[in-house]
Image (cartoon, rainbow, N blue to C red):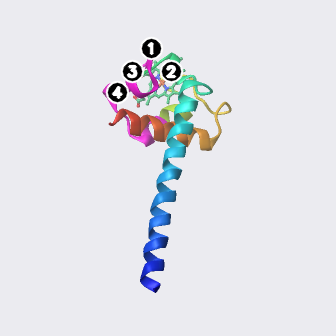
Amino acid sequence: MKLRLIFFMLLVFSFTSHLKSDEIFLKGKEIFLNAGNCASCHTLKDAGSVANIGPNLNEIKPAAGRVKNSVINGIGVMPSALGILTDEEIDAVSHYVSVSSNY
Ligand code: HEC
């Protein structure tokens, strides 16, 4: 009986943590296309964007930390998104870019 309960809790936990990461992914995609304006400068297949002012994200396949760094600090002509996106939004878009470009 106890074992069943533990299995059930593990099942619920793995299901909800999966849902949570999907939510962050979708939120990040939304930011990539809208508030973050990333799609107007970058190509990313998952987002359907084809701009080439910045590097093609499917080619550089950046890790989340690298995305976050460039979004916070800006790089070259890419403006910093500080003050435009919240910390949470920057984390979400970084997660989205790293996961979707590394398929
Ligand atoms: C105005 C155009 C523009 C916008 C908007 C823009 N970028 Fe960029 N991005 C660039 C350019 C140009 C570079 C290359 C900069 C360089 O290397 O000098 C770049 C570089 C990058 C890099 C690579 C950084 C590295 O370490 O080489 C990543 C990742 C990135 N952008 C993600 C994003 C994300 C995510 C967003 C949205 C929050 C975004 N960019 C918005 C133009 C833009």
Label 4 crowd (10 A; few <14 / some 14-19 / many >=20): some
Tell me if label 2 and label 4 are in contact, CB under 8 Å: no
Q: From the image, which quarter does the N terminus lie in?
A: bottom left
- The amino acid type found where label 2 is placed reads Ala
User: Mark 2 — residue?
Assistant: 39
Residue 58 disc label: 4
Quarter of the image where one finds residue 7: bottom left
Compared to residue 12, the image places residue 86 above or below, namely above
Q: CB at mark 1 closer than 8 A to ligand 1?
A: yes
> In terms of depth relative to the viewer, which is nearer, 71 or 96?
96
- The amino acid type found where label 1 is placed reads Ala
Mark closer to the chain start, 2 or 1: 2
Tell me if label 4 and label 3 are in contact, CB under 8 Å: no
User: Mark 3 — residue?
Assistant: 55
User: Mark 1 — residue?
Assistant: 51
As for residue 23 lying within the magenta part, the answer is no
Label 1 crowd (10 A; few <14 / some 14-19 / many >=20): some
The percent position of residue 11, horizontal first and vertical second, equals 45, 66
